Image (cartoon, rainbow, N blue to C red):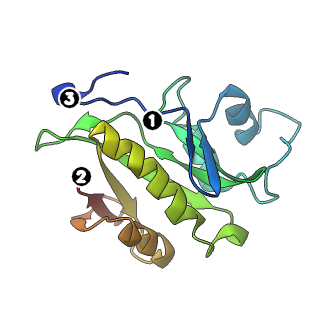
């Protein structure tokens, strides 16, 4: 396990599981397929996966980085992605912090999958002593509800794109 600012443990498992979901870390084959570098479509991908946001997340992928993008898989079907925008960095208050992003194909929305996936990852970040923030468009009511359900209570204003920046305090 690696150590972050202030000696905080910062390693995450390569596979995170919840009651209904698996959140496997992306590897080179998944990233190549998401980027469209492979001609064969992987079995198990929902017909609407990857979404534009998934392709964007693939640009953040670094081999072996456990803070990178992951699939959201129910049964054998990949429904979306979730992950961090890189390893934690020390925030102004000295606490290790990273930003999370998540999204699902339209058909998977409304079933609680995003909330469940985010809760599973947050259990890992809590254990590692890492605070998490998220940026969300103010009109994205679904994501705002998900963030509220899992404890993102600190509103930090907006970023340069006009997205609300929210944080979840460490327990």
Q: Quadrant of the C terminus?
A: bottom left
Counting from the top left corner in percent of width and height, residue 159 is at 29, 59
| Residue 95 placement: quadrant | top left
The residue positioned farthest toward the left in the image shown: 93
Which element type, helix, strand or loop, lies under badge 3?
helix
Label 3: how many Cα within 10 Å (few below 14, some 14–19, many 20+): some
Numbered tag placed on residue 5 in the rendering: 3
The residue positioned farthest toward the right in the image shown: 40
| Residue 134 placement: quadrant | bottom left
Numbered tag placed on residue 67 in the rendering: 1
Query: What residue is at 53 percent from the left and 23 percent from the top?
Result: 64
Q: State left or right for residue 135 relative to residue 49.
A: left
Of residues 27 and 50, which is closer to you in this image?
A: 27
Q: Quadrant of the N terminus?
A: top left
- Mark toward the start of the polypeptide (3 vs 2): 3
Tag in front: 1 or 2: 2
Counting from the top left corner in percent of width and height, residue 62 is at 53, 27
Q: State left or right for residue 63 relative to residue 44.
A: left
- Residue 118 lies, with reference to residue 16, above or below; the image says below
Q: State left or right for residue 156 relative to residue 10.
A: left
- Residue 68 lies, with reference to residue 153, above or below; the image says above
Counting from the top left corner in percent of width and height, residue 96 is at 23, 38
| Residue 106 placement: quadrant | bottom right
Numbered tag placed on residue 170 in the rendering: 2
Tag in front: 3 or 2: 2
> How far is mark 3 from mark 1, CA to CA?
15 Å
């Amino acid at each position: 396990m690696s150590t972050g600012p202030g000696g905080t443990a910062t390693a995450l498992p390569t596979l995170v599981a919840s009651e209904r979901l698996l959140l496997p870390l992306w590897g080179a084959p998944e990233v190549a397929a998401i980027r469209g570098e492979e001609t064969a479509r992987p079995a198990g991908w929902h017909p609407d996966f990857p979404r534009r946001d998934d392709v964007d997340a693939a640009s953040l992928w670094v081999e072996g980085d456990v803070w990178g993008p992951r699939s959201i898989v129910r049964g054998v079907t990949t429904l979306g992605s979730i992950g961090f925008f890189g390893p934690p960095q020390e925030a102004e208050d000295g606490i290790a912090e990273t930003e999370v992003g998540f999204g699902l194909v339209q058909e998977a929305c409304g079933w609680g999958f995003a909330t469940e996936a985010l809760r599973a990852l947050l259990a890992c970040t809590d254990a590692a002593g890492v605070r998490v923030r998220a940026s969300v468009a103010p009109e994205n009511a679904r994501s705002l509800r998900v963030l509220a359900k899992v404890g993102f209570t600190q509103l930090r204003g907006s970023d340069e794109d006009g997205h609300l920046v929210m944080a979840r305090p460490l327990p």
